[in-house]
Image: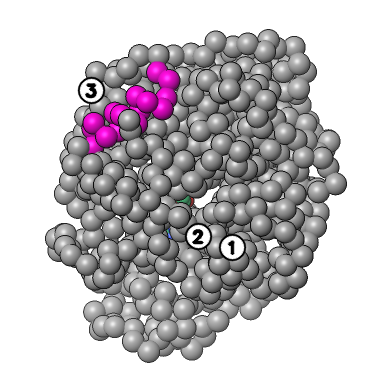
C-alpha cells in the first residue's frame, strides 16, 4: 500500500526518506494506486537538468478529466463538486454535483469540438470566477486542448500578448464581471485585444452581467444556446502523460511573461497528492481556496487537486470587502467550510478592520487554515491563528510557484508542528538545497542562501512555451544540476525553512508576481518619459508596493503637466493592468548606474524603503552625485 495519506510526524519522516531514497518507486506506487490510466508507463522518470529535460510516466496514457470526474460518478455522483458562491450574497449559491459537472464539461467539450478545437490547440480563457471558468478548463482537458487562462484583471494589451504568444485559436470570455459593488466589462477588452490577434477564429461569450456587448458576425457567439444544444456525453480524448495540459503566464525579472507549460500525468499526481495531505481533506469536508483561477493556485487547488480527490471545492466570485469585511467569515459559516486557503495580503487587509466582522460568525467548522503567495509576516500569522483559527486550526504556510505546479514546502496540518513565518519542512519527494554566492550548497542547519531544488518532482513545469532555451537559462543555469527558484530562504536550527523573499527583480504585490522590466517598458512608452526604474518597498497590506523613479525628457515637465503621474499609471493600466500601478512616482534627473550602465536597484530599493543608513559602496558608480538628489526628494 502506498502512503497516500500521511497522518503523523513519524510517518512523514519515514515516507519522506523513502521518497528521496527511491523517488521512482515512491511516485510509481502513488500513481498506480490512486489514479486511472488508460495505459501504464514504461518508465517512471527520465531527467537531465543540464538540457533541461524532465519526463514523468513515459508513454503512459490518460485523460485527467476521467480522474477528476468520471471515476467519481458511481460513488460521488450526487456529491457537490463545485460550490459556487456568487458576488452578491443575495444571489443563491449553486451546488454543482459531480454528475452535473461531468455533464457541463461534456457539453462544453462538444461545443469546442464543433468549433474545430482539437487535441493540442490552444484556447484562451478570460473569465471571472463563475462556474463556466472551471468547466472551460476541464472541457479543454477533456479533448486534449491546452488551456491558457488569463486573469480577468489584465488589460487588453496584456491579453493580446498572451493570446499571440501561444497562438490561441479560440477565446472564451464573458460579457462582464461583478466585483463587489462594481460591474466591469470584459468582452470590450477582448474586442480591443483581438484587433491584434488574427489567429483567433472564434469567441464564445458567457452571459453574466447582462452588459451590452458587440458580437462580431462569424466570430462571436453566446455560449449558453450552444451548450443547451450540445450532447451531455463526450468521449475523453486520450493524451500522453507528457502532453501539455495548460500554459500559464508568469512574470520574469526580464523580458516578456513566460508561458509556463504544465503537462498532464505528473501534474495530476502531484497536485492531487499535495492537496490530500496539506489540507488533510476528508470525504465530507468543504474546502475553500479564495484564489482566482487566473493564477496557478486556482488551477491546482480549486480545480485539479480537489476534483482529483473527489472533494467539494468552493468557488467564490466576490471580494473580501463586499458587502462588508465579514464576507469571508460569512461564507465560512454559511457553507461550514473546513479548510480555508487564502493569501497574506487578504489577511492583513481584514486585520485592519473591526474584529466584530470575524467574531459575529460561527467559524467552528474550520480545521485547517492555509496561506500562499508571499511570506506571511508574524503579526498577520498571529491574527489569523488567534481570531480565525481560535488557536486550534493549524496554519499551513505553503511555499510554491507557478513553475512548481504544486506545493513544495509546507507543514502538514496535525502532523508538522507549525511556527509563525515558517513554511517548515519540504513536502514528500521535494529535495531543497540552499546555495551560497559561490555556487556551493550550504549543508547543515542555521544557514541562509538561495533556494534551489535538487531533484525533479512530478508537478514541475517542463518548458516555457515556444522558448525552451529561456527555460534552461532562467531556471537551470545559475546552479549546475539544480532548479533555481528565484527565492531566498533560511533553514533554522531544527531544519525548518523560512522563505525570505525574491532575490531577483520580481516584486510580489498583494500576492501577485510582477516583473519590473515590463512595468518600466510601459512607463517608458509615455511620450514625456526618458527612462525609469521600478523597485518594491514594504507596504502594510500589499506586502510590497511599487515605487517608480522616472527621468523625464524635459526637465521641469513635471511642473507643467500636473497629471503626469496619473498619466503614467494610466499607461501601466492600459499596457498591463491595474495591479501593476505605482504607489509612488518620483521624478529624478538621473538614476544611479554602474560603469557598465546597469541601474543599481539595490540603492533605489533602500531609498524607497526609507533605509538609507547603509547604502553600501557607491564609489564605483558612474554618477554617484544623483543619490543625494534622489534621497532629498524621496517620497
Ligand atoms: C512567493 C504562487 C513566501 C515566492 C503559488 C514565490 C511565497 C512566488 C509563498 C511564486 C510562501 C509563494 N511564503 N513566499 N508561502 N508562496 N511565495 O508563481 O516568492 O504566483 O517564488 O505562485 O511567490 O508566485 P506564483
Magenta segment: does it hold 169? no
| Front of the two marks 2 and 3 | 2
Residue drawn at x 45%, y 69% is: 420
Placement of the N terminus among the 4 image quadrants: top left
| Distance from Cα at disc 1 to Cα at disc 2 | 8 Å
Residue drawn at x 50%, y 60% is: 395
Tag 1 and tag 2, C-beta contact below 8 Å? yes
Magenta segment's dominant SS is helix
Q: Does ligand 1 reach within 8 Å of label 1's beta carbon?
A: no
Residue position marked by numbered label 2 in the rendering: 395
Using the rendered image of the protein, determine whether residue 140 is visible from the camera's viewpoint.
Answer: no
Pick the front one: 613 or 256: 613
| Distance from Cα at disc 2 to Cα at disc 3 | 37 Å
At mark 3, the secondary structure is: strand
Reply above or below: 354 against 172: below
**Magenta residues, as a range?**
23-37
Amino acid at each position: 500500500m502506498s502512503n497516500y495519506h500521511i497522518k503523523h510526524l513519524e510517518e512523514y519522516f519515514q515516507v519522506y526518506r523513502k521518497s528521496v531514497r527511491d523517488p521512482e518507486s515512491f511516485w510509481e506506487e502513488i500513481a498506480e494506486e490512486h489514479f486511472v490510466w488508460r495505459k501504464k508507463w514504461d518508465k517512471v522518470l527520465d531527467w537531465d537538468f543540464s538540457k533541461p529535460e524532465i519526463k514523468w510516466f513515459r508513454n503512459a496514457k490518460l485523460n485527467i478529466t476521467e480522474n477528476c470526474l468520471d471515476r467519481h460518478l458511481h460513488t460521488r455522483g450526487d456529491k457537490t463538486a463545485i460550490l459556487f458562491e456568487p458576488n452578491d450574497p443575495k444571489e443563491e449559491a449553486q451546488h454543482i454535483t459531480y454528475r452535473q459537472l461531468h455533464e457541463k464539461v461534456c457539453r462544453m467539450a462538444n461545443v469546442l469540438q464543433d468549433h474545430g478545437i482539437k487535441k493540442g490547440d490552444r484556447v484562451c480563457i478570460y473569465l471571472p470566477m463563475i462556474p463556466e471558468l472551471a468547466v472551460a478548463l476541464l472541457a479543454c482537458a477533456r479533448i486534449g486542448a491546452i488551456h491558457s487562462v488569463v486573469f480577468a484583471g489584465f488589460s487588453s494589451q496584456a491579453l493580446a500578448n498572451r493570446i499571440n504568444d501561444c497562438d490561441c485559436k479560440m477565446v472564451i470570455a464573458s460579457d462582464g464581471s461583478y466585483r463587489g459593488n462594481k460591474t466591469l466589462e470584459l468582452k470590450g477588452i477582448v474586442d480591443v485585444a483581438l484587433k491584434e490577434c488574427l489567429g483567433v477564429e472564434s469567441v464564445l461569450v458567457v452571459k453574466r452581467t447582462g452588459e451590452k456587448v458587440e458580437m462580431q458576425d462569424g466570430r462571436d457567439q453566446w455560449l449558453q444556446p450552444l451548450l443547451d444544444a450540445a450532447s451531455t456525453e463526450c468521449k475523453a480524448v486520450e493524451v500522453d502523460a507528457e502532453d501539455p495540459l495548460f500554459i500559464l503566464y508568469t512574470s520574469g525579472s526580464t523580458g516578456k511573461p513566460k508561458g509556463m507549460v504544465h503537462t498532464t500525468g505528473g501534474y495530476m499526481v502531484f497536485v492531487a497528492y499535495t492537496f490530500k495531505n496539506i489540507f488533510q481533506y476528508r470525504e465530507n469536508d468543504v474546502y475553500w481556496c479564495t484564489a482566482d483561477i487566473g493564477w496557478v493556485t486556482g488551477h491546482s487547488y480549486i480545480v485539479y487537486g480537489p476534483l482529483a480527490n473527489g472533494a467539494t471545492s468552493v468557488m467564490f466570485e466576490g471580494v473580501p470587502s463586499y458587502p462588508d469585511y465579514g464576507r469571508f467569515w460569512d461564507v465560512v459559516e454559511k457553507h461550514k467550510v473546513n479548510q480555508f486557503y487564502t493569501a497574506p495580503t487578504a489577511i492583513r487587509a481584514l486585520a485592519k478592520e473591526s474584529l466584530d466582522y470575524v467574531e459575529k460568525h460561527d467559524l467552528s467548522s474550520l480545521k485547517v487554515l492555509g496561506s500562499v503567495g508571499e511570506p506571511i509576516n508574524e503579526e498577520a500569522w498571529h491574527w489569523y491563528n488567534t481570531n480565525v483559527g481560535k488557536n486550534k486550526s493549524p496554519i499551513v504556510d505553503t511555499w510554491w510557484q507557478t513553475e512548481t505546479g504544486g506545493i513544495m514546502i509546507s507543514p502538514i496540518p496535525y502532523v508538522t508542528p507549525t511556527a509563525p513565518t515558517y513554511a517548515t519542512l519540504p513536502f514528500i519527494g521535494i529535495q531543497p538545497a540552499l546555495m551560497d554566492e559561490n555556487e556551493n550548497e550550504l549543508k547543515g542547519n542555521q544557514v541562509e542562501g538561495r533556494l534551489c531544488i535538487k531533484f525533479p518532482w512530478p508537478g514541475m513545469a517542463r518548458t516555457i512555451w515556444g522558448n525552451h532555451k529561456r527555460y534552461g537559462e532562467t531556471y537551470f543555469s545559475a546552479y549546475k544540476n539544480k532548479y533555481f527558484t528565484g527565492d531566498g530562504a533560511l533553514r533554522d536550527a531544527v531544519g525548518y525553512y523560512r522563505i525570505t523573499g525574491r532575490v531577483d527583480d520580481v516584486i510580489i504585490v498583494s500576492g501577485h508576481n510582477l516583473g519590473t522590466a515590463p512595468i518600466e517598458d510601459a512607463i517608458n512608452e509615455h511620450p514625456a518619459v526618458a527612462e525609469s526604474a521600478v523597485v518594491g518597498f514594504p507596504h502594510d497590506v500589499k506586502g510590497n508596493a511599487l515605487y517608480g523613479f522616472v527621468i523625464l525628457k524635459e526637465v521641469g515637465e513635471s511642473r507643467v503637466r500636473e497629471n503626469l503621474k496619473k498619466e503614467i499609471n494610466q499607461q501601466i493600466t492600459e499596457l498591463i493592468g491595474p495591479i501593476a500601478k505605482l504607489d509612488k512616482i518620483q521624478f529624478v534627473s538621473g538614476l544611479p548606474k554602474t560603469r557598465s550602465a546597469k541601474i543599481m536597484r539595490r540603492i533605489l530599493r533602500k531609498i524607497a524603503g526609507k533605509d538609507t543608513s547603509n547604502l553600501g559602496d557607491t564609489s564605483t558608480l558612474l554618477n554617484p552625485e544623483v543619490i543625494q538628489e534622489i534621497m532629498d526628494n524621496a517620497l
